Amino acid sequence: MKHELVSLAGLQVPLLSLEEGEEAIVLSDAHLGLRLGGQARDKHDELAAFISHARRDPRVKLFILLGDIFELWSAPLKDVVSSSYEPLRELARSDATVVFVAGNHDRVLAGLRLMSARGAGDVIVVPELLLLDVGGKRVLLFHGHQLDRAFLITRSLWKVQSYVYMLSEVLHALPGNLEWALALLSLLLLVLLFMYVSASTVVVELALLLAAFFLLTPLLVLVWRSIQEKVWYSLIQPVAYRFSRGRLRGKSVRTLAVSKPLAKLVSLVEELVGRVDAVVFGHTHIPELVVENGRIIANSGSWVENDGHAPSCTYVRISSSAVKLVKWGGGAETVLGEAPL
């Protein structure tokens, strides 16, 4: 398998080439560590069993982890590490190349630079996009939040949640309840500061505002992490998905195949590297494969419980002959959809 970098609108995008007889496994949205209502929602055992199965297939030369593999958005870091252990151990046992493409929930890992004992090239971390050449056909892969209007409107503001998450984990790592003591001490300092320092000049006023921001941050971060599950997953997301016309979650792949954000992204890529024959993404948790205007569009689905709205434990298998949407269950693979490449 060959590996090179191509320049795409200022981004250095990896271009990997599969040889004849080689295949790639694409999976996304494992959300390892995710707990809702105190119950585990990820399927890390199933994922570990599947990777163990797939790594023994001599045709599989590439594992592409297409974002939101780790729930580094709301789950305690200890749960993420615990859930990730077995799947990552199985990946480490594989001789295949592993590519991690950052999603919105694990964006904090986008800057990783990894090299194993086998040397450079077997573990690749990609911030945004990946291109795959299979028998002269081009496949574009990305997580999928790039098509979500909520992320397009807020531009880069959504990335703030990643920093909030990391700061909250640092605070929670303090012994006992020291994080709350630190937050309350910061609040007390802020009150004393405003009691005894008067904003006599613009410079002093700006200094007070800056101090207020830093001193209030620990308390605000801890409060948000305490209520995040109920507010975000139980209130904001359901309401947004129900009433937002621009919501991405729940939309079919056929609808997204003709959407403006996807058309714009594909056009940009095609202007620089030539025709894109297939597009693969995740993010919506809705596994589906369609052919639109001669181009294959596939969603890899997820590895979490989807409340009955869509099957889980799904992935995409790419070879020189076809793109397949496959479900893992009961120790066997079931093809849900297939299109010749």
Image: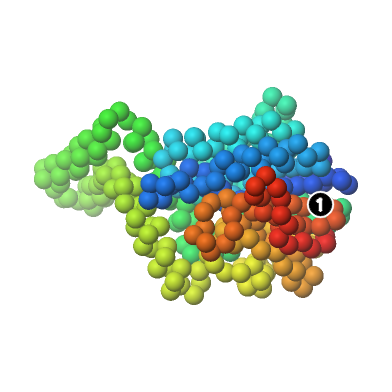
Q: Dividing the picture into quarters, in which one does residue 296 lie? A: bottom right
Q: Dividing the picture into quarters, in which one does residue 118 lie? A: top right
Q: Dividing the picture into quarters, in which one does residue 263 lie? A: bottom right
* Local SS, label 1: loop
Callout 1, which amino acid?
Ser
Q: Is residue 161 left or right of residue 114?
A: left
Above or below for 87 versus 158: above
Q: Residue at x 81, y 38 (%)?
A: 58
Q: Nearer the viewer, residue 339 or 155?
A: 339
Q: Residue at x 73, y 37 (%)?
A: 55
- Residue 230 in percent (x, y) is at 34, 55
Q: Residue at x 16, y 50 (%)?
A: 200
Q: Residue at x 77, y 61 (%)?
A: 338
Q: Residues within 10 Å of mark 1 (few under 14, many from 20)?
A: many
* Residue 98 showing in the rendered view: no
Which residue bears the numbered disc 1?
Answer: 319
* Residue 57 showing in the rendered view: yes
- Quarter of the picture containing the C terminus is bottom right
- Residue 225 in percent (x, y) is at 34, 47
In this picture the colour scheme is rainbow
